[in-house]
Amino acid sequence: GESVGLHLPTLSVQEGDNSIINCAYSNSASDYFIWYKQESGKGPQFIIDIRSNMDKRQGQRVTVLLNKTVKHLSLQIAATQPGDSAVYFCAETVLNAGKSTFGDGTTLTVKP
Amino acid sequence: ETGVTQTPRHLVMGMTNKKSLKCEQHLGHNAMYWYKQSAKKPLELMFVYSLEERVENNSVPSRFSPECPNSSHLFLHLHTLQPEDSALYLCASSQEQGREKLFFGSGTQLSVL
C-alpha cells in the first residue's frame, strides 16, 4: 500500500497496512505546508502541517516528510483504517505573501 | 464540527435566478475565504476577506459577488450563472489571512440548470 515519490490520483490499501500519499509542490519559495483530509460530503479538514525549517513531523498515526531539494511532500498513515478513506490534499504557502495553493488530491480507499 | 457553517447544503438554480450562499464562523477568526471545488481540479481560491475587507479577488466573474458584513459572516451572491459554475462552494476561515491552517465548512453543492 505504498507509492514512494510519485503522486497518484488514487491509492488503494488493505486495512492495517501503512499508506504513503505524495505531493509535488511547485514554488521553491513555499515555506509552510499542510495536509488536509476531505471525507465524502464534508469540507477539507486539517491533518498536520510542517514548516520548511523541518523535514519531518509526527502526529497521531500520521507523519509528514518534507524534501525541499526535490520539492516533495509526503503523508504517511500508519495502520490504515476504513475511516481513513477520503481524498487527501496538500497545500503550500509562502508565508510572507500570505498565498496558499492546493495540490491535486489523492483518493485513498481502505479495503477491509 | 469545524466551527464553520454553510447554508444551504444543496442548491439548484436556473441561469436567470439570483441566490445567495451563506457562511458563518464561530471561531473568532479574522479571515474568511470562498473556494470553488470542481471535479478533477484542485481547490480554486475565489475571494479572501481579512478583517471584513476584501484583500483578494482571483479574476472571478462578476456574476459572483461576495459580501462580508462582519468578521463572522460571509455571503456569496449569485446572479446569471452558467452551467459550468456548477461545483461545490466551500467557505473557510483562519485566524490570520494566508498564514495559518484553514477551517472549512461542509460546502454548498450548486447545480446550475
Image (cartoon, rainbow, N blue to C red):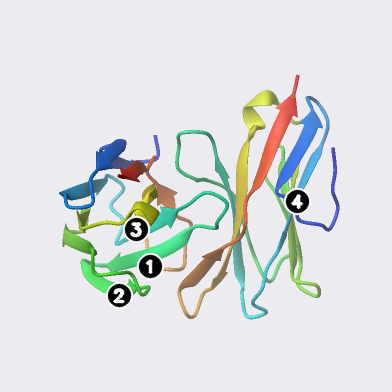
Mark 4 element type: loop
B99 left or right, relative to A79: left
First in sequence: mark 1 vs mark 2: 2
Identified by mark 1, the residue type is Gln
CB of mark 1 within 8 Å of CB of mark 2?
A: yes
Chain at tag 3: B
Q: Residue at x 35, y 52 (%)?
A: B83
> Counting residues from the N terminus, which is met first, the one under dot 2 or under dot 3?
3
Question: Mark 4 to mark 3: distance in Å?
Answer: 27 Å
Which of labels 1 and 3 is toward the front? Answer: 3
What chain does mark 4 sit on?
A: A
Q: Which mark is residue B97?
A: 1
> Residue A86 lies in what quarter of the image?
top right
Q: CA distance from mark 2 to mark 4?
A: 34 Å
CA separation, marks 2 and 3? 12 Å
Disc 4 vs disc 3: Cβ atoms closer than 8 Å? no
The residue carrying mark 4 is A8
Element assignment for label 2: strand
Q: Is the same chain shared between marks 4 and 3?
A: no
N-terminal-most mark, 1 or 3: 3
Three-letter amino acid code of the residue under disc 4: Leu
Q: Position of residue A36 (x, y in %)?
A: 57, 49
Q: Which residue is the site of mark 3?
A: B34
* Crowd rating for badge 3 (residues with CA inside 10 Å; few <14, some 14–19, many 20+): many
Residues marked 2 and 3, same chain: yes
Q: Is residue A76 above or below residue A78?
A: below
Q: CA distance from mark 1 to mark 3?
A: 13 Å
Q: Tell me whether the residue at label 1 lies in contact with that at label 3, contact meaning CB atoms closer than 8 angstroms.
A: no
List the residue tagged with mark 2.
B55
Q: Are discs 1 and 2 both within one chain?
A: yes
The three-letter amino acid code for the residue at tag 2 is: Val
Quarter of the picture holding the C terminus of chain A: top right
